[in-house]
Amino acid sequence: MFEIGLKIGRAKKGLTEKSLNPTDIFARNGLSGYDFMTWIKNGIKIFDINFNSSGDLVVAYNKCSPVSTVINRLATSMANGKWWIVDDADSDVIDKYPNIKSIIDNPNPFQSWQEFIIQLDIYRNIFGEVFIYSPTKTGFEKQALFVLKPTLVKPIVSKQIDFFSKKEDIITGYEYNATYFRRVLIDPKDILHIKDVYQNLSDDAIQFRGKSRLTSLEYEIRNVIQAQEAIYSLNSDRGAQGILSPQQKDADGGVPMTKQQKEEIQQEYKQQYGLRNGQRKIIITDASLQWQQMSYNVRDLMLFEGIKQNIESITDAFNYPFELLANSKGSTYANKNEAKKSLYQDGIMPISDIYSQAFTTFFQLNDGHKFTIDFSHIECLQEAEKEKAESKRALNMANKIAFESGIISAEEWREDLGLDQQINGGTMVNG
């Protein structure tokens, strides 16, 4: 790993005002706290988020609580898995790899293995990909594992690409923006790149980068955030309730309020009167005012119903059972238990297979050994294994009766149990 010279100064880099992204422009003008979820147009706040921007994907994760809840729960569920290295007979052989065992016990100075897996899985779900860096010394094995933020990693791709090229011939290195002032070049053999299941359908002939599932949830996430903001506004400001209009008149008719008078009454009402504790409930003023009621049935907005429908779309996209969320009313224990099974069988385990295969290739294990991630100790899955064993026993007893009655052969019996017809090259015979 060595440093690449980074030219400091936008003038040297040839960046113009138009080529700078919003973060650069606002930070340069002292507006680093600008909220990219709210934009100003004609003096009115409007809502916007760009799901093609990796920075806004993070904002979506931070601002939309259902998104962060689902992604965090998926990551903690993934961290429940026990990592092993096994041979062809599924026997544990991790003791043959003391260096890897040491890394699993302590992946880096800052994280436990569970913390490492949680960060890895959260990044994959947010960005659609994750990069893992394993620093090595010349002639030595891998020393540690670090999760790199995908927005800071750029593959360096060879210009000579064909469909028969090896990966090391296509990607010659990875550029990592360690800080704003320096970049480092990482050897491709030290980087493990894992992509999510959501496919990148850009026009490039070969896809090097992953794609976030959040990009397909653009409207759902916008709807949830806006509905949550509306509920907050109703709770905080109680919405538009009515109009206070002046009653003063002269010979020419009504006397309008000055802008200053309007502002003073507005501020006094907002700060001193309301339903919260300590606020006044009766308005007493010297101004001659008339109250005109403005009311709207909040139920007609169907904010909660709209949120639920959009959250269901979010959970579907991430293979997370909606029944496991707190706002899923009417779910029984049995329903939630089945939902937990579904979570692991349909969501966690398929991704864990991607992880185990990727780590097996990355660490170049010997003799057909491979990583495996075991979830059999999870309570809901233990019940499933018990049911499977009881079902297999019942099937075996039924086949035993059929075999002894001469209805089926030993080979048919074994085939029905999902086993090979022969044992050690010899065929079973009756009697």
Image: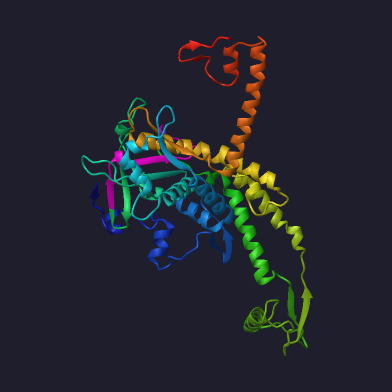
Q: Tell me which segment is drawn in magenta.
A: 183-207
Q: Does residue 133 appear anywhere in the picture?
A: no
With respect to residue 254, does 240 lie above or below? above
Observer-nearest of 278 and 389? 389
Closest to the observer, 241 or 249: 241
**Where residue 239 appears, x then y in whole percent?**
69, 69
Which of 269/388 is in front? Answer: 388
Residue drawn at 64 percent across, 28 percent down: 391
The residue positioned 59% from the left and 52% from the top of the image is: 221
186 magenta-colored: yes
Q: Is residue 346 left or right of residue 122?
A: right
Q: Is residue 296 above or below residue 192?
A: below
Q: Specify whether residue 66 is painted magenta.
A: no
Q: Where the C terminus falls, by quadrant?
A: top right
Viewer-proximal residue, 245 or 386?
Answer: 386
* Residue 274 visible from this viewpoint: yes
